[in-house]
């Protein structure tokens, strides 16, 4: 009974904090709306001013808004579900909540920048990625357990160091290319090396990684582990595709910031929320086995 009351108390606190945060955000939103031009339909004027591709601009605005709401909802879900898994998997749920929670705040500000100025902010985007991408890689030790993490090293670096350095390389060169700080195609190739480092460390759906030994992963966790690998190996392909549609990279004359934003926003929702959901499924299944 005491355990049930503790869970209810935790959920009540989480929901109260969430409502408070949403109320604060809503207050800021009202203030922001007062500074932007609003059309008769209640939408920002630049979305319906008859200039450019209104449908694509509307879709971009919608995906920013949807991303903010979806990430926020996922944050609440993962926090509430944290107490419904075995203690050894609660760190996994905490990391899942951090990833989508951080993304929700960045999406709120990216949506605001686009609504106010009609500009897609790459700065907020990369601030989000530089925090959340390493956290996504760290899902592996928290889910599969420390026994499945090998002592293998590459250039003196273990699993965690390889993943962090790979994330810094991938995100750093991606930003350098999109910000026009270096040749955009060279930046894409160098950033891809960081992606390859993370794949080498975590493994693929068909092989163990340098830092993860499949033979030491509990059978009930293998599906979730391989699902996480599918997200990294296949799901992350959307990001370099979005990069090619960046106005700075300009793979063709038809590219624009809206196309890039829609691709990035879609990839983020699929990968960040999906990453957390499959980890939660594995944690629930493993928790049931030890109950």
Image: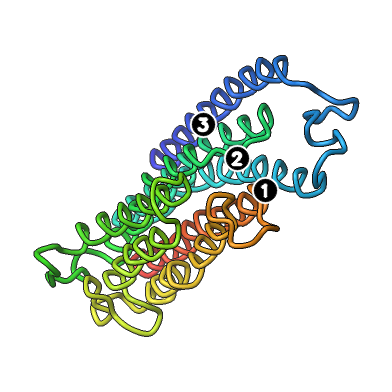
Pick the residue in front: 274 or 128: 128
Q: Position of residue 101 (x, y in %)?
A: 48, 40
Total marks drawn?
3
Farthest-out residue, left:
156
Can you identify the residue that label 2 sits on? 120
- SS for dot 1: helix
Q: Is residue 5 left or right of residue 267?
A: left
Q: Is residue 170 above or below residue 130?
A: below
Q: Position of residue 43 (x, y in %)?
A: 81, 30
Pick the residue in front: 48 or 86: 48
Determine whether label 2 and label 1 are within 8 Å by CB.
yes
Residue occupying the point 25% across, 82% down: 215
Residue occupying the point 54% across, 30% down: 18
Q: Residues within 10 Å of mark 1 (few under 14, many from 20)?
A: many
Farthest-out residue, right:
40
Q: Is residue 38 left or right of residue 278?
A: right
Q: Is residue 52 left or right of residue 103?
A: right
Alpha-carbon distance for marks 2 and 3?
A: 36 Å
Can you identify the residue that label 1 sits on? 258
Numbered mark located on residue 12 in the image: 3
Q: Residues within 10 Å of mark 3 (few under 14, many from 20)?
A: few
């Amino acid at each position: 009974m005491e355990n049930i009351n503790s869970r209810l108390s935790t959920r009540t606190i989480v929901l109260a904090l969430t409502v408070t945060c949403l109320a604060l955000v809503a207050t800021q939103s009202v203030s922001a709306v007062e500074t932007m031009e609003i059309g008769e339909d209640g939408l920002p004027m630049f979305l319906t001013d008859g200039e450019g591709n209104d449908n694509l601009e509307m879709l971009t605005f919608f995906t920013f808004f949807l991303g903010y709401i979806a990430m926020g909802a996922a944050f609440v879900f993962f926090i509430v579900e944290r107490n419904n898994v075995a203690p050894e998997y609660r760190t996994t749920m905490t990391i899942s909540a951090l990833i989508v929670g951080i993304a929700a705040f960045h999406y709120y500000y990216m949506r605001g920048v686009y609504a106010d100025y009609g500009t897609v902010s790459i700065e907020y985007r990369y601030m989000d990625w530089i925090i959340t991408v390493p956290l996504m890689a760290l899902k592996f030790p928290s889910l599969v357990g420390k026994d499945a993490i090998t002592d293998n090293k590459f250039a003196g670096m273990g699993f965690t160091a390889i993943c962090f350095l790979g994330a810094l390389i991938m995100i750093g060169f991606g930003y350098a290319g999109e910000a026009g700080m270096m040749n955009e195609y060279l930046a894409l190739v160098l950033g891809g090396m960081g992606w390859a480092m993370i794949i080498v460390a975590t493994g693929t759906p068909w092989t163990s990684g340098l830092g993860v030994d499949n033979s030491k992963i509990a059978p009930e966790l293998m599906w979730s582990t391989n699902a996480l690998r599918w997200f990294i190996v296949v799901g992350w392909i959307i990001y370099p595709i979005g990069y090619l549609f960046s106005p700075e990279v300009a793979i063709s004359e038809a590219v624009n910031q809206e196309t890039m934003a829609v691709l990035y926003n879609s990839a983020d929702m699929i990968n960040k929320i999906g990453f957390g959901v499959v980890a939660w499924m594995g944690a629930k299944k493993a928790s049931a086995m030890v109950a």
